[in-house]
Image: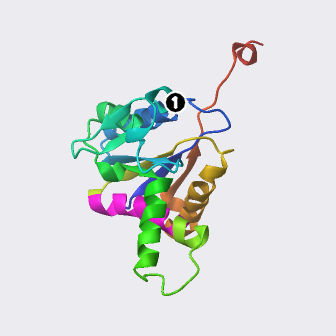
């Protein structure tokens, strides 16, 4: 069976519960006998949340390999009963650092380094590497923030490009949790 990809993104409201939705979906798929891997993409420029205020970003979750990651990784581990590592949390800061290191080493052969294709390719490579290194049936990738955040644009573009890269049959469209007020539920 080829790896399938599921992306969980937010609408225009932050803290809507994307992490819990992603973790719950992972648990349901695991209960159906599928091998699941999950990762969190955060569009902030910090390398990791280790130095960020917990009042602003929430608590830091430390993985077995000592990586300071987003608290959603703790939900993922507990819900799906898997151990994640430093590669399970990707930030804009990490991606830009990697791309700039490659540029300094001359790996782009003098090309002008740009968001498209260099940053988006690096993001797609993180998703594909998760599939290759874990031999999972399903890769769930949650993108933090909201679709209205400018910081999210390279992440969303990378997800859009994944459809062409892996083929439509391998790609589940993005899941967006939504907030409903009780007024909308009453007829």
User: In the rendered view, does 124 fall on the left or right side of 177?
Assistant: left
Q: Is residue 130 magenta?
A: yes
Tell me the chief SS of the magenta region: helix
Q: Is residue 74 above or below residue 158?
A: above
The picture quadrant where one finds residue 106 is bottom left
Q: Observer-nearest residue: 13 or 44?
A: 44
* Nearer-the-camera pick, 176 or 33: 176
Which residue is rendered at x = 30% and y = 42% of the image?
33
- The total of numbered circles placed on residues is 1
Q: Is residue 167 above or below residue 88?
A: below
In the picture, residue 111 is in which quadrant?
bottom right
**Quarter containing the N terminus:** bottom left
Q: Does the magenta stretch include residue 102?
A: no
Residue 162 on image: x %, y %: 53, 63
Q: Quadrant of the C terminus?
A: top right
In the rendered image, is residue 167 in sight?
A: no
The answer, for residue 105, to whether it is visible in the render is yes
Q: Residue at x 74, y 18 (%)?
A: 184
Q: Where is residue 136 in the image (x, y as percent from the top left)?
A: 32, 54
Mark 1, residue position: 56
For the record, the magenta segment spans 120-133
Q: Where is residue 104 in the image (x, y as percent from the top left)?
A: 43, 77
State the residue in front, 116 or 173.
116
> Pointer 1: residues within 10 angstroms few (<14), some, or many (20+)?
few
Give the side of residue 94 with respect to residue 66, left or right: right
């Amino acid at each position: 069976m080829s790896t399938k990809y599921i992306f969980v993104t937010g609408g225009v409201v932050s803290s809507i519960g994307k992490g819990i939705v992603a973790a719950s979906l992972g648990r349901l798929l695991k209960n159906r006998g599928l091998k699941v891997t999950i990762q969190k993409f955060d569009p902030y420029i910090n390398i990791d949340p280790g130095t960020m205020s917990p009042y602003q970003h929430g608590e830091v979750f430390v993985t077995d390999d000592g990586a300071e990651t987003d608290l959603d990784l703790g939900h993922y581990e507990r819900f799906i009963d898997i151990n994640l590592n430093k590669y399970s949390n990707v930030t804009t800061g990490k991606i830009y650092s990697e791309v700039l290191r490659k540029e300094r080493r001359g790996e782009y052969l003098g090309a002008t380094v740009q968001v498209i294709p260099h940053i988006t390719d690096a993001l797609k490579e993180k998703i594909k590497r998760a599939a290759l290194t874990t031999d999972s049936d399903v890769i769930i990738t949650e993108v933090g923030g909201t679709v209205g955040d400018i910081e999210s644009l390279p992440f969303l573009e990378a997800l859009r490009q994944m459809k062409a890269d892996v083929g439509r049959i391998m790609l589940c469209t993005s899941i967006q949790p939504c907030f409903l007020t009780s007024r909308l539920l009453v007829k």
